[in-house]
Image: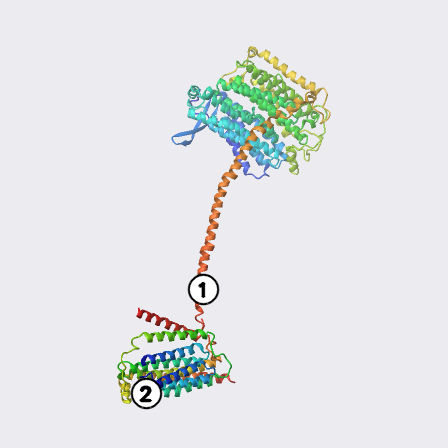
């Protein structure tokens, strides 16, 4: 249902939401590095403004839960015009609020976290640019505009992962992220082009002519293309490729754990809450395009990813990497949700996940900050005594992630499992999802026991992490004022401490949401799901009476408790004494544990296949360029040089030499002739006499003849 | 008729004198031999009936030019130093002279003019005729010769005189 | 041999002798002497042609010889004056040493 009246003010000015942070980024780029307050103020100010506008947009969407668009022509190709535009519908509205809110909290957190970093201004510039681009992805009504913002998001992700570019690991991780997502983006681009050729437009909704609207969809579903697929299936799968790359699904998940080289706020905002969710959002946005076949693929990929990543997370020792694999796993859940249950199921989990995963990452950042940039969980321990606020909020996030009953994650994950259970195609994804939930509870419990319980373990060896390096560089640049009124207190070695209020504040706010946000979509009041479909929702306990729902909730609760119990069994009974002590699981199954710790050798697999192929191709290209093409050029240059030498020779020996020879001969002849003029009278006389003789002979001879 | 003995003797004398003049070592001897050659030539002129020319030859050549040569030898001390008589490329010059003679002889032998059919009688060349010729037919050459002689005389004096003044200045 | 040819031969011989002397002797005076001999040979030629040639009554040859003698005299005077001048300048009358007009 389209809006026929004059668009509301917020709809006309919806473009401000992404543009304000981008403007802030532009201004920050012009500031010198020392202007920290101005850059932070610009970033936080623009994000706050965007948040307020997003709330207004949300209110508008509440009132008009339909798709409203504003389109404008952009570029002309001959007779056709390419149009861009933005839209506002319930899905976009919730995404806007989520992105701006979480983003704002993380911005505030970053002020404290990056206080000791000397590239403060650059950080906020990139963060604002990212925020602007992400918001652009959310409100884009044209696949082209979405793609453009998508690329900027990828760019800022690269810039932020490699923020400490002087660290080789960070630079390599940034490159890996960019290249891996690029592979996915290629699929997205091909899909986009194909869609344009099929439907003639890239606008999603355009009063009936958009590519997601009925006319275009029925036109596409009539075609059969390669491998017997419908065209819409093929296009949907290609667009899904972009989502696979950006959201870290198997097999393009390898960049996400390495992306932890970036600062923790970056990990929280980009690689937990928003950017990786962009892939999920993309699928949700083009959902009308996805046929049952493509959704089947989406569901299977999501399920396998969820299980696979959860397995690897069990054996990781870096606090952020555990969370990274957890993110990969949860993104798999979101894709699974989209595939089996529809937009509402997947997006509900996306929203809740954004909050508690951001919370977990920010908490991890607080832990790292408090432990003097230590990131290995084996070197932590007993932090709940040192950092109580962090511990409490982290627990809230952890329980939400595990799907502990009544926390936010419980409702959203349960919705996914319920939909997977009821999927007509196969029960496989359900079992994978359930196993993944068990593992999720298990590894989060493991992490909790390692980090917060037991006694504090001193680090055995100095581990240089990203934060260590950056802090070592800017050790002099302490901003006491930013440390929330604790002047002079810097990270003292081996003395964990709670983080300043500017960091724990956002943690607390996010914790509240992690606990309570699930209740906007719980079966008793499925407001969220109905809002996305444009319907109204009522509070009704009868929502629980859906067949199989209660039993599924019980089963999932059992799974969660089983996971927590296993975690306690292995890690909680006997506190971990020393940092070098082998993991409890490792003692049990060293082989499997080691393989999981090595991330199931995915990177090595890629190294041997794709990268080796690329290396060979580049070697071949270099060989061709240097020896064949370069050889031709060299040959030509030799020929030309030879011709040059030949010319030189000719010029020097033939032309010059000949000329010189001629001159020499002339002068020699002159010298010879000059001997006639020897100044001696008698020789002159003799010459006259000889001439006389010759003349006489001539005359006589002639006369005789 | 003319290939008689006196003619031959006179010719031989003249030639001997010429050869001697050109080959003798000491310059004074050369000058004397030259005089004999001139005298022989004068006699030949007389023998051929050109009395005026012969006597003019005697007067001018023997009487003036030969003396002039002797004076020149005196003044240039030509006899004093011991020097080589012939120039470095004398042999070539002799060959050239020989070639010239050969050509001239050949010309003489091959020309018809030199072999007239009949012998003309001796011409009469009285002084009256000579004087009249000089004053009528050859008056222009006569005057020009006079001018030329005057110029030559003045020129010779000037050339010799200047040197003398420079020599005077150089002496102290 | 008829008398004309004989005279001509004698004069040619005398001319050659004079030329030989002019070409071979070192002393400038003797070069002049050679030239005088050559002139004389030419004079003998004239006389011979006057005596044995046509129209001897025109006295051409005879008077030519007279003029020639006059010219020879003038030339000898000037020449010897020049030799004196050269001798004063170069202190030698050797023609093979006086090469200032060389080149």
Q: Nearer the viewer, mark 1 or mark 2?
A: 2
The reply to whether residue A577 is visible in this rendering is yes
Judging from the image, mark 1 belongs to the subunit labelled A
Tell me if A616 is positioned left or right of A205 in this view.
right
Q: Residue at left 49%, top 26%?
A: A188
Quick one: SS at disc 2?
helix
Count of marks overlaid on the render: 2
Seen from the viewer's position, the closer of residues A277 and B161 is B161
The reply to whether residue B154 is visible in this rendering is no
| Residue A565 marker | none
Quick one: SS at disc 1?
helix
Name the image quarter holding residue A71. Answer: top left
Give the Cα separation between the discs numbered 1 and 2: 57 Å
Which x, y percent locates residue A19? 50, 31
Judging from the image, mark 2 belongs to the subunit labelled B
| Residue A667 marker | 1
Disc 1 with disc 2 on a shared chain:
no
How crowded pointer 2 is (Cα within 10 Å; few <14, some 14-19, many 20+) is rated as many
Seen from the viewer's position, the closer of residues A669 and A14 is A669
Q: Residue at left 65%, top 27%?
A: A318
Q: Answer yes or no: do the residues labelled 1 and 2 have beta carbons within 8 Å?
A: no
Which x, y percent locates residue A283? 51, 22
Which x, y percent locates residue A380? 69, 27
| Residue B52 marker | 2
How crowded pointer 1 is (Cα within 10 Å; few <14, some 14-19, many 20+) is rated as few
Seen from the viewer's position, the closer of residues A69 and B42 is B42
Vertical arrangement, residue A138 with respect to residue B150, above or below: above
**Figure colour scheme:** rainbow
User: Which image quarter is the C terminus of chain A in?
Assistant: bottom left
User: Which image quarter is the N terminus of chain A in?
Assistant: top left
Seen from the viewer's position, the closer of residues A243 and A564 is A243
Name the image quarter holding residue A561. Answer: top right
């Amino acid at each position: 249902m389209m809006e026929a009246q004059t668009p509301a003010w917020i709809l006309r000015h919806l473009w401000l939401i992404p543009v304000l942070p981008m403007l802030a980024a532009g201004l920050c780029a012009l500031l010198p590095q020392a202007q920290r307050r101005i850059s932070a103020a610009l970033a936080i100010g623009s994000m706050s403004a965007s948040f307020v506008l997003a709330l207004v947009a949300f209110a508008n969407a509440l009132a008009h839960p339909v798709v409203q668009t504003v389109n404008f022509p952009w570029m002309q190709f001959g007779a056709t015009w390419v149009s861009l535009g933005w839209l506002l519908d319930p899905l976009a509205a919730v995404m806007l609020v989520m992105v701006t809110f979480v983003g704002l909290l993380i911005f505030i957190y970053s002020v404290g976290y990056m206080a000791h970093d000397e590239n403060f201004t650059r950080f906020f510039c990139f963060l604002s640019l990212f925020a602007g681009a992400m918001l652009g992805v959310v409100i884009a009504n044209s696949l082209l505009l979405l793609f453009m913002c998508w690329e900027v998001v990828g760019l800022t992700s690269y810039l932020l992962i490699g923020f400490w570019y002087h660290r080789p690991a960070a630079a390599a991780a940034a490159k890996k992220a960019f290249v891996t997502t690029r592979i996915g983006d290629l699929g997205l681009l091909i899909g986009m082009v194909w869609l344009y050729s099929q439907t003639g437009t890239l606008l999603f909704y355009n009063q009936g002519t958009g590519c997601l609207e009925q006319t275009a969809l029925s036109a596409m579903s009539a075609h059969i293309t390669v491998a017997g697929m419908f065209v819409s299936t093929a296009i949907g799968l290609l667009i899904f490729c972009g989502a696979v790359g950006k959201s870290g699904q198997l097999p393009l998940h390898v960049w996400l754990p390495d992306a932890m080289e970036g600062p923790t706020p970056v990990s929280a905002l980009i690689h937990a809450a928003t950017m990786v969710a962009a892939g999920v959002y993309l699928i949700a946005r083009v959902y009308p395009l996805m046929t049952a076949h493509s959704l089947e693929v989406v569901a299977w990929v999501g399920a396998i990813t969820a299980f696979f990543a959860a397995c690897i997370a069990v054996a990781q020792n870096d606090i952020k990497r555990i969370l990274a694999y957890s993110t990969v796993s949860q993104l798999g859940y979101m894709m699974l949700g989209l595939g089996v249950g529809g937009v509402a199921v997947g997006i509900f989990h996306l929203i809740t996940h954004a909050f508690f995963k951001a919370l977990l990452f920010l908490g991890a950042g607080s832990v790292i900050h408090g432990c003097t940039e230590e990131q290995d969980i084996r070197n932590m321990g007993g932090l709940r005594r040192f950092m109580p606020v962090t511990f409490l909020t982290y627990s809230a996030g952890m329980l939400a992630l595990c799907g502990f009953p009544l926390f936010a994650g419980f409702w959203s994950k349960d919705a996914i499992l319920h939909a997977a259970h009821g999927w007509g195609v196969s029960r496989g994804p359900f079992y994978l999802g359930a196993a993944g939930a068990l593992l999720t509870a298990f590894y989060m419990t493991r992490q909790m026991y390692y980090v917060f319980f037991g006694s504090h373990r001193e680090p055995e060896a100095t581990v240089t992490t990203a934060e260590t390096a950056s802090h070592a560089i800017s050790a002099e640049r302490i901003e006491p004022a930013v440390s929330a009124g604790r002047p002079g207190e810097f990270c003292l070695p081996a003395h964990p401490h709670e983080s300043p209020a500017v960091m724990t504040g956002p943690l607390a706010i996010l914790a509240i949401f992690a606990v309570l946000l699930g209740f906007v979509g719980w079966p008793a009041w499925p407001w969220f799901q109905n809002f996305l479909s444009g319907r109204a929702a009522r509070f009704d306990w009868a929502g629980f009476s859906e067949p199989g729902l209660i039993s599924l909730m019980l089963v999932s609760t059992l799974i969660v408790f089983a996971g927590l119990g296993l975690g306690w069994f292995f890690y909680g009974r006997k506190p971990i004494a020393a940092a070098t002590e082998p993991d409890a699981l490792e003692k049990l199954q060293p082989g499997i544990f080691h393989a999981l710790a090595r991330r199931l050798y995915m990177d090595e697999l890629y190294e041997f296949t794709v990268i080796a192929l690329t290396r060979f191709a580049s070697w071949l290209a270099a060989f061709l360029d240097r020896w064949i093409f370069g050889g031709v050029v060299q040959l030509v240059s030799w020929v030309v040089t030879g011709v040059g030498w030949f010319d030189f020779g000719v010029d020097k020996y033939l032309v010059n030499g000949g000329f010189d020879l001629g001159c020499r001969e002339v002068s020699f002849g002159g010298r010879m002739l000059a001997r006639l003029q020897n100044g001696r009278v008698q020789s002159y006389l003799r010459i006259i006499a000889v001439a006389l003789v010759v003349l006489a002979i001539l005359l006589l001879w002639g006369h005789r003849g | 008729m003319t290939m008689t003995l006196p003619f031959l003797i006179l010719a031989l004398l003249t030639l001997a004198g010429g050869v001697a003049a050109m080959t003798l070592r000491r310059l004074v001897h050369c000058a004397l031999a030259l005089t004999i050659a001139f005298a022989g030539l004068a006699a030949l002129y007389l023998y051929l009936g050109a009395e005026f020319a012969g006597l003019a030859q005697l007067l001018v050549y023997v009487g003036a030019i030969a003396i002039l040569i002797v004076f020149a030898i005196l003044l240039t001390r030509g006899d004093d130093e011991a020097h080589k008589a012939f120039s470095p490329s004398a042999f070539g010059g002799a060959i050239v002279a020989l070639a010239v003679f050969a050509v001239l002889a050949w010309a003489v032998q091959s020309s018809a003019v030199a072999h007239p059919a009949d012998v003309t009688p001796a011409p009469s060349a009285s002084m009256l005729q000579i004087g009249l010729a000089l004053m009528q037919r050859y008056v222009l050459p006569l005057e020009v010769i006079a001018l030329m002689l005057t110029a030559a005389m003045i020129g010779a004096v000037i050339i010799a005189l200047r040197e003398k003044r420079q020599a005077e200045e150089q002496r102290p | 041999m008829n008398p004309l040819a004989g005279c001509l031969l004698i004069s040619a011989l005398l001319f050659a002798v004079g030329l030989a002397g002019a070409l071979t002797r070192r002393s400038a005076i003797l070069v002049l002497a050679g030239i005088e001999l050559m002139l004389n040979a030419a004079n003998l030629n004239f006389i011979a042609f006057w005596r044995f040639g046509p129209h001897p009554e025109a006295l051409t040859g005879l008077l030519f010889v007279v003029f020639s003698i006059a010219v020879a005299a003038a030339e000898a005077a000037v020449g010897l004056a020049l030799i004196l001048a050269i001798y004063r300048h170069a202190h030698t009358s050797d023609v093979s040493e006086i090469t200032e007009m060389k080149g």
